[in-house]
Amino acid sequence: MAHEKEIKINFPQDKHGGVYANSLFVGYTREEFIIDFIMAAPPAGAVTARIVTAPAHMKRFLAALQDNIKKYEETFGEIKPAMDPKGPFGFNA
């Protein structure tokens, strides 16, 4: 039986404030998923963070998101889906 060990996570000071994203791109290869979080503000946009992870980790990531959305909606009510964006970067052209 495997023994779980505590892992100490370093949280760099420059990451404490997080980054804002209002769009994202998801791509994949056989070995990994790539998620680019994007801050789009016409006429340009910039990738604010990129996550590269293995398919098995991505599946757990998705399950964690679904679980947390469920808990959020139980607490605060249903999240209404945003309308489909139009134009470049998800804004009306």
Image (cartoon, helix red, strand yellow):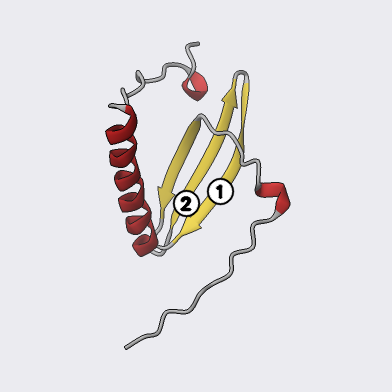
* Amino acid at pointer 2: Ile
Q: Residue 37 location in percent, x, y?
A: 53, 40
Q: Quadrant of the N terminus?
A: bottom left
Rendered view: 87 above or below 58:
above
Nearest the viewer among 3 and 82 is 3
* Amino acid at pointer 1: Arg
Rendered view: 85 above or below 9:
above
Tag 2–tag 1 contact (CB < 8 Å): yes
Measure the C-alpha gap from mark 2 to mark 1: 7 Å
Q: Residues within 10 Å of mark 1 (few under 14, many from 20)?
A: some
Dividing the picture into quadrants, the one containing residue 74 is top left
Q: Residue 14 location in percent, x, y?
A: 72, 48
Q: Residue placed at 65% from the left, 46% from the top? A: 16
Dividing the picture into quadrants, the one containing residue 58 is bottom left
Task: Give residue 77's mark.
Answer: none
Q: Which residue is mark 1?
A: 50
Q: Residue placed at 30% from the left, 52% from the top? A: 63
- Say which element carries label 1: strand
Nearest the viewer among 26 and 75 is 75
Q: Residue 51 location in percent, x, y?
A: 52, 52
Q: Which residue is mark 2?
A: 34
Q: Residue placed at 55% from the left, 35% from the top? A: 38
Rendered view: 4 above or below 65:
below
The earlier-in-sequence mark between 2 and 1 is: 2
